[in-house]
């Protein structure tokens, strides 16, 4: 999945979840960001979390040609991680977004990895790596 289509998928997924703490979902460009792709989720608490979307092409993918989606089994959503309470922070947002995206049922999506759960995780370094059945990857970096 290419970054532009992933951005739409992620925003639609967050909107469809209709979490009561979510007040607005925008692309980073709409929110005044300089990154070409990403999303901002604003919460009723006054907090906003931003994620930049960076893509890694599938082997042989050519951007001058139409994207050919590759489907397989959708990933299972991780247990927990879907709760937002109080004032959401980057760690809470990472777990919440990972849960939403993996639970969305996309048959293009193979897996979702939370950066903070890696053995070599660095404090304050939050984001996701999404692997697709096409071989493409999308990195969703908390900014």
Image (tube, rainbow, N blue to C red):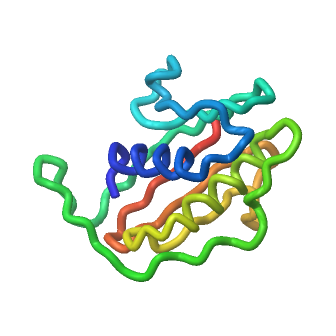
* Percent x, y of residue 75: 53, 76
Task: Give the quarter of the figure containing the C terminus.
Answer: top right
Q: Nearer the viewer, residue 36 or 99?
A: 99
Task: Give the quarter of the figure containing the N terminus.
Answer: bottom left
Which residue is painted at 39% across and 31% down in the image? 36
Which residue is painted at 59% across and 31% down in the image? 24
Q: Nearer the viewer, residue 123 or 112?
A: 112
Tell me: residue 118, above or below residue 71: above
Q: Classify residue 114 as left or right of residue 47.
A: left
Residue 57 picture quarter: bottom left
* Percent x, y of residue 6: 40, 50
* Percent x, y of residue 44: 75, 30
Residue lying farthest left? Answer: 65
Tell me: residue 22, above or below residue 30: below
* Percent x, y of residue 38: 48, 37
Q: Nearer the viewer, residue 58 or 9?
A: 9
Residue lying farthest bottom? Answer: 73
Q: Classify residue 58 as left or right of residue 138.
A: left
């Amino acid at each position: 999945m290419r970054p532009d289509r992933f951005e739409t998928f992620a925003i639609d997924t967050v909107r469809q979840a209709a979490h009561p703490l979510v007040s607005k979902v925008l692309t980073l460009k709409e929110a005044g960001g300089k990154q070409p792709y990403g999303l901002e989720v604003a919460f009723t608490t006054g907090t906003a979390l931003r994620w930049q979307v960076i893509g890694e092409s599938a082997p042989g993918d050519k951007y001058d040609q139409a994207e050919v989606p590759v489907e397989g089994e959708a990933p299972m959503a991780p247990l927990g991680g879907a709760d937002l309470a109080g004032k959401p922070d980057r760690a809470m947002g990472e777990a919440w977004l990972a849960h939403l995206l993996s639970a969305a049922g996309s048959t293009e999506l193979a897996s979702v990895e939370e950066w903070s759960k890696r053995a070599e995780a660095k404090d304050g370094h939050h984001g996701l790596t999404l692997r697709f059945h096409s071989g493409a990857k999308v990195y969703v970096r908390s900014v």
